[in-house]
Image: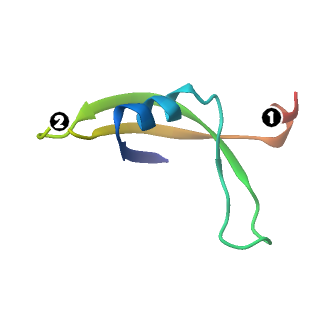
Amino acid sequence: MRVCFYGTDAEITHICERPVLVMVGPRRSQPVLAFTLAGVSITTDPYGSLFRLTADLAEVHREEVTE
């Protein structure tokens, strides 16, 4: 899955420093999914105030996270 994150330099750096990203479902019954970033590309907006991180998310399976 290809995603984009928009944010300041500090926010984008914070995302890139994490080895695993977690997505929590809107309800407790939905599973928590873990992803790693691949194919990361960072660009600036025309006004230079925000950055855009574009990346592919690769799902991490439970066995990989607990090891």
Question: Which label belongs to residue 43?
Answer: none
The residue at which mark 1 appears reads as 65
CA–CA distance in space, label 2 to label 1: 36 Å
Rendering coords of residue 8 (x, y %): 34, 38
Q: Name the residue at 32% across, 30% down.
A: 42
Q: Which of 56 and 5 is in front in this view?
A: 5
Q: Mark 2 — residue?
A: 48
The picture places residue 45, in percent across and down from the top left corner, at 19, 40
Residue drawn at 47 percent across, 38 percent down: 56
Query: 52 and 13: which one is in front?
Result: 13
Q: Which amino acid does label 2 sit on?
A: Gly
Q: Is residue 48 left or right of residue 57?
A: left
Q: Which numbered disc, 2 or 1, marks the residue closer to the eye?
A: 2
Label 1 amino acid?
Answer: Val
Sequence-wise, which precedes: disc 2 or disc 1? 2
- Percent position of residue 62, x then y: 82, 42
Which quadrant does the C terminus fall into? top right
Question: 7 or 39: which is nearer to us?
Answer: 7
Circle 1: is it few (<14), some (14-19), or many (20+) Cα within 10 Å?
few
Judged from the image, the secondary structure of the residue bearing numbered disc 1 is helix
Q: Position of residue 46 (x, y in %)?
A: 11, 40
